[in-house]
Amino acid sequence: MTTGLLGVGVSFAEELSGVVTVRGVTTATVGMGSCRAQGLTLPSGERTWTVLGAGHRVVGPAEEYLEYLRAQQVSPNTVKSYARALALWWQFLELFGLDWDAVTLENFGAFLSWLRTGDGPAVASIERRRARFAESTIAARLVAVISCYDHHVLNGVDWAETCTGSLIVAAVGTSRCWNTSPAARAAGRR
C-alpha cells in the first residue's frame, strides 16, 4: 500500500481513489500509542474510516480489510466501528511490541485484559475498579479483530487460520462470531 502526506496529519491511500478531504478525526478510545481511527470523506462524498499508525500512515492490513468491507457495501457505521476496534488492536500491538502477523492465542487474551483494564505490559493490577469498556463492547471489538484475521485467511494468510480458529473456541466459546463475520458471509459460510 502506498501512502502520501498531504499536510500535517493528513494522509491518504491510493487505494481510496483520489485525494481525500479529512473532515474529522476520532481517536481510538485510549490515549496511549500512535494508532487511531480517522474519518475521511472521499471525493464522491462518501464518508468512511481508516486506521492510521505511526507517522500518520495507513495501517495496511487494517485498510485492506476495511476496503473489503466498503466493497461489500456494509453500513458506514460498521466500517467506523471496525476501524475503531482495529485501531485499538494496533495500539495494543504497538504497546506490547508485537507484530500483527505473529500473534498467539495468549496475545488475544492479553488484548481482552488490556481492553478491560488499560494496564500496560509491565503492570499486573490487583486493584478492584470499573472496566474501561462494557463486556458487549469488548465482544464487538474482538469480533472486528477476528473478522480482519478471517479476511486475511480467505486471502491466503495460512498462519491466521489456526490462530483465529483456536481464539474463537477458547475466548468466545462458540463459532457464532466466525459465522457472522462479513468475510465469512462473502465466502458462503452460514
Image (cartoon, grey):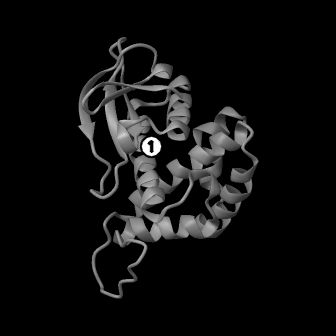
- Residue 4 % position (x, y): 40, 24
* Crowd class of label 1 (few under 14; some 14 to 19; many from 20; radius 10 Å): many
Front in this rendered view, residue 58 or 38? 58
Q: At x 40% / y 83%, what residue is drawn?
A: 124
- Residue 139 % position (x, y): 47, 59
Left or right position of 91 against 69 = left
Q: At x 40% / y 53%, what residue is drawn?
A: 88
Q: Is residue 33 above or below residue 52?
A: below
Q: Is residue 45 above or below residue 35?
A: above
Position of the C terminus by quadrant: top right
Q: Which residue is mark 1?
A: 82
Is residue 173 visible to the viewer in this orientation of the structure?
no
Left or right position of 58 against 8 = right
Residue 25, quarter of the rendered image: top left
- Residue 164 % position (x, y): 66, 56
Secondary structure under tag 1 reads: helix
Q: Amino acid at mark 1?
A: Tyr
Q: Is residue 134 above or below residue 86?
A: below
Q: At x 42% / y 49%, what residue is drawn?
A: 85
Front in this rendered view, residue 166 or 103? 103
- Residue 118 % position (x, y): 34, 68
Is residue 36 visible to the viewer in this orientation of the structure?
yes
Q: Is residue 140 above or below residue 124?
A: above
Left or right position of 23 against 64 = left
